[in-house]
Image (tube, rainbow, N blue to C red):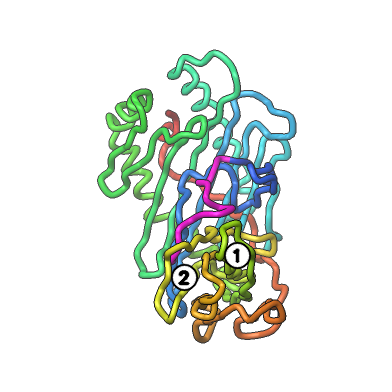
Amino acid sequence: MSCRPGRESGRSASHVWPGQATEAGSPTTAAQTGLQLASGAPHRTPSGSAASHSLRYFHTALSEPVQGLPQFVQVGYVDDQPIDLNDSARQELPQVPRMELHADGPWPWDRRSRAPWSAEQVSLANLATLQKYYSQSGGLHTLQWMFGCELRSDGSKGGYMQFGYDGRDFLSLDKEHLRWTAADATAQLTKRKWEAEPAIAQGWKAYLEGECVEWLRRYLEYGKETLQRTEPPEVKVTHQKSSTENVETLVCQAHGFYPKEIEAAWTRDGENWEHGTFCNRVAPIPDGTYYISLYTDVEPEERGRYRCRVAHAGLSQPLALAWEGPAGERWLAGGRRGRSGSGVSLGLASLFHCQDFHQDSQYI
């Protein structure tokens, strides 16, 4: 990605709830939900290579009720597609239609029905513990808990588990070295407690590298028509006036692509161009696809030297588009005109799964 975050999206990701307004005033989507503890630049995969996939669970607990928000919420994702939502107000709200489960398929619905509520109990108990650790007798406080695994495009695996408190890092697992990383002196209390019981880190490592990855593979198989599809980006280049004299801004917008891995950059005379270039991070849109925008400041007489280059798994070859004047400001569909309207339904049930190791390993 040959640009640096800036313009509208220059802020780092914040901890917000699904549907809650951001600073810019727009509601967040499910894929931007509050436990964005692993925020950062998205992975980029060159066009034509296999995409990475992830299974993630996010939990948020509030110390006291807030109007319009549940006191506890749990959201599960395969990639950025929501697969289930449980909260203390509405209970279980599957995000995708149930499917008929085969004998060799995932657990039936009723066998898992009580699993999310233990997560709520653990999260609220941990939140109360942290308030005591920090000598806080009242006020609104939040605990965020995220864990998940990924299958990367190069065939390797990844896994992570971490906690955040009041919007800041608290504790995370170093899975490879079976160590806990404490973000402050208070987190050292939990770090020492858990490191005195090596089975806790070992249990999480086994889960993240084993059961979690197996469930991710099952999700990808049952939802392969959606999760392993490719939707090429539609791209256009537009022109904006700049507040700086003798400077204008070219804007490259790509939207409607899936998976989210994409390469997008401005070039000048065929070479990557980073000077005066900014971009938004790849972000989801309601139809289950993604968009990105790139900006570059140019001198009007040199605008013809610039191209927006976009490469994606859904494109047979990269696109290189220039601004062609107002008449040329139209969407160019990569590979076809229009969209399929396939939507985001995975055609699978919300298949919540739990760690098999002892529940005490989740108490701070």
Sequence-earlier tag: 2 or 1: 2
Q: x%, y% of residue 291?
A: 60, 65
Residue shown at 63%/81% (left/top)? 324
Q: Is residue 269 left or right of residue 279?
A: left
The residue where tag 2 is placed is: 51
Asked whether residue 76 is drawn in magenta, I would say no
- Decide: is 142 above or below 227: above
- Decide: is 61 above or below 316: above
Could you classify mark 1 by the number of other residues whose Cα lies within 10 Å: few (under 14), some (14-19), or many (20 or more)? many
- What stretch of residues is rendered in magenta? 1-15
* Residue 104 in sight here: no
Proximity of marks 2 and 1: CB atoms separated by less than 8 Å: no
Q: x%, y% of residue 11?
A: 53, 47
Quadrant housing residue 267: bottom left
How far is disc 2 from disc 1 in space, using C-alphas?
Answer: 14 Å
Q: x%, y% of residue 307?
A: 51, 78
Q: x%, y% of residue 103?
A: 58, 65
Q: Which residue is outermost to the front?
A: 245
Residue shown at 45%/19% (left/top)? 134
The residue where tag 1 is placed is: 290
